Image: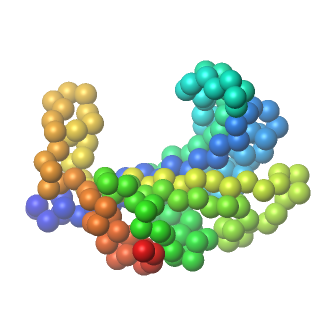
C-alpha cells in the first residue's frame, strides 16, 4: 500500500500564452491554444499595475488551459517531442515542478503555419506530485505533508527520465 502512495504522477499541465494586451492578439492566442490542446482557453488578467508596460489591474493579458489526467500526459508527450525529448535541469524547481517554453505552435506535429494567426510561443508548466498531496490543500482537516512525501528536484528528474524517456541536460 505505501509503495503505491510513493509513485509520482503528473498532477496537471498548464499551457499559457501571454500577449500583454487584450484585443486581436489575445483572440489569435486563444485560437492557437484551442488548436493545440483541443480545450477552451481561459483568459488571464493582470494582478498588478505597471505603468511602464501599460498594464492595469484586471486587464486581460493572456490565456491558459489546464489539463489533468490522461490528457495532461498525452499533451506533455507531444510538448516534449517538440523539444526532441530534452529538458534542462534548471527547468525543475525545488518541489519537483517543471516549466519550459515552446517557441512556436507549428513545432507540434500536424500544425501548419497560418499567416492570419502569425507566430505564437507558449509556456508549459508541469506539476509532479505523489498521491495524498491533497491533504495539504483541502479546506477541512488540512495537514502538513511529511518531508519524505514531498517531491524533490532529483526525484522529479528521475520520474521524467523513466516515464517520459526525457533527456535532462546538465
**Quarter location, residue 109:** bottom right
Q: Position of residue 54 (x, y in %)?
A: 72, 27
Q: Position of residue 133 (x, y in %)?
A: 24, 46
Inspect this view and state whether residue 58 appears.
no
**Quarter location, residue 43:** top right
For the N terminus, the image quarter is: bottom left
User: Does residue 128 appear left or right of residue 90 in this picture?
Assistant: left
Compared with 127, 27 (above or below) is: above
User: Does residue 80 appear left or right of residue 54 in this picture?
Assistant: left
Q: Position of residue 157 (x, y in %)?
A: 35, 68
Q: Nearer the viewer, residue 152 or 90?
A: 90
For the C terminus, the image quarter is: bottom left
**Quarter location, residue 149:** bottom left
The residue located at (11%, 61%) in the rendering is 2
Give the colour scheme of this rendering.
Answer: rainbow
The residue located at (73%, 54%) in the rendering is 120
The residue located at (89%, 57%) in the rendering is 115
Q: Position of residue 127 (x, y in %)?
A: 39, 53
Please tell me how many numbered marks the rendered image carries.
Answer: 0
Q: Nearer the viewer, residue 68 or 58?
A: 58
- In the picture as drawn, the residue positioned furthest to the right comes out as 115
Amino acid at each position: 500500500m505505501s509503495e503505491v502512495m510513493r509513485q509520482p504522477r503528473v498532477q496537471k499541465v498548464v499551457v499559457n500564452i501571454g500577449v500583454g494586451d487584450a484585443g486581436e492578439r489575445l483572440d489569435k492566442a486563444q485560437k492557437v491554444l484551442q488548436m493545440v490542446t483541443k480545450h477552451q482557453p481561459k483568459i488571464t488578467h493582470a494582478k498588478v499595475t505597471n505603468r511602464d508596460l501599460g498594464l492595469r489591474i484586471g486587464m486581460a493579458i493572456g490565456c491558459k488551459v489546464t489539463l489533468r489526467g490522461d490528457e495532461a500526459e498525452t499533451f506533455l508527450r507531444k510538448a516534449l517531442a517538440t523539444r526532441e525529448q530534452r529538458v534542462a535541469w534548471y527547468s525543475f524547481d525545488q518541489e519537483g515542478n517543471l516549466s519550459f517554453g515552446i517557441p512556436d505552435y507549428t513545432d507540434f506535429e500536424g500544425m501548419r503555419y497560418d499567416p492570419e494567426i502569425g507566430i505564437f510561443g507558449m509556456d508549459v508548466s508541469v506539476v509532479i506530485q505523489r498521491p495524498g498531496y491533497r491533504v495539504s490543500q483541502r479546506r477541512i482537516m488540512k495537514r502538513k505533508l511529511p518531508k519524505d512525501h514531498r517531491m524533490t528536484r532529483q526525484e522529479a528528474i528521475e520520474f521524467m527520465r523513466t516515464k517520459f524517456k526525457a533527456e535532462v541536460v546538465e
